[in-house]
Image (cartoon, grey):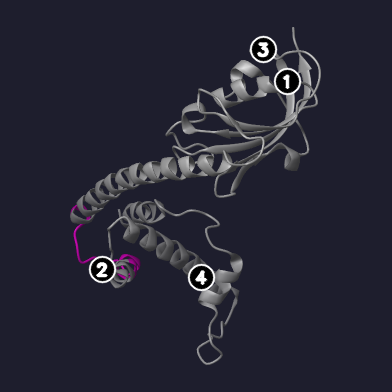
Amino acid sequence: MIFFLLKRIMFLLLLFYIPNSYSKTQLISQFQPSLETKKIFKNENEKIGYALGVSLGNYVNQSFEKQKKLGIQLDKNSLLLGIQDAISNNLQLSSQEISEILENLEKKLKNATKIQIKKDEKENLIQGQLYMEKFSQIKGARKTHSGLMYIIENPGKGEEITENTEITVHYKGSLINGVEFDNSYSRGKPVVFTLKDVILGWQEGLKYIKKGGKIKLVIPPSLGYGNTPLNGIPGSSTLIFDIELIDVKNN
């Protein structure tokens, strides 16, 4: 039962943990011991135990900060006491009480998360609109009736593209803050697909160029992934794609 409760606690702690949200350098500086307090480990097992403890501490610190932003503040000392009592099998609350408390906390966190996601979506929409306003001032920028914005860097030559056209492209996708979420160039291999199988922004935008052409697309959420988070793309995100149309095949 104690093992189960510990697993439940870790689930709640890790609920908002995002890997790689801070650098290795930050980790080293945060936990670098002073010469006066640095512990002398007697053997490898002590080092392993300490390393696991630091890893747990990192998770705890991150989850506490994220929960704090959601308006939920937990007491670190109580958490440490709970871990100590669980290890020594000397619990101050019954297993049923602990289970009920964790269930309530889980509900509270999920509700707070939903509220935060809605706030983030609204902010993403606002920032996306501001970005598109600035983009519209760039030389060569165009906007369609659907809301798609684009700049043709090279129109290319050849056949017209239809929904059933098989196309081969290289592309880079990023958010308006510059964070890259996909890149076929870095994978070293272009992507082949039928135009009708991609997001609406691509379906419309790629018809403005031909084989050998290059285009930059700025795609609002309505023509992208909407308010659904997907593979590192937050909900209601405006997307930027730099696309190179390598080959076109009309069947």
**Of the numbered discs in the image, which one, if any, rests on residue 167?**
1
Image quarter of residue 206: top right
Q: Which residue is mark 3?
A: 162
In front of the other: label 2 or label 4? 4
Viewer-closest of 134 and 163: 134
What residue do we see at 39% from left, 51% from top?
A: 15
SS at circle 3: loop
* Secondary structure beneath label 2: loop
The mark lying in front, picked from 2 and 3, is 3
* Residues at marks 4 and 3 touching, judged by CB atoms closer than 8 Å: no
Q: Residue 192: x percent and y percent?
A: 72, 23
User: Who comes first in sequence, dot 1 or dot 2?
Assistant: 2
Label 1 and label 2: CA atoms lie apart by 65 Å
Residue at the farthest bottom position:
36
- Residue 43 vertical placement versus 116 (above, below): below
* Sooner in the amino-acid sequence: mark 1 or mark 3: 3
Residue 229 shown in magenta: no
Q: Earlier in the sequence, mark 2 or mark 3?
A: 2
Q: Residues within 10 Å of mark 3 (few under 14, many from 20)?
A: some
> Where in the figure is residue 28, as x and y percent of width and height?
57, 73
In the picture of the structure, the residue carrying the numbered disc 2 is 90
Instruction: Choose mark 4 or mark 3, whichever is in front.
Output: 3
The reply to whether discs 4 and 1 touch (Cβ–Cβ < 8 Å) is: no
Residue range in magenta is 83-96
| Mark 1: amino acid | Ile
Q: Amino acid at mark 2?
A: Asn
**Disc number at residue 49?**
4
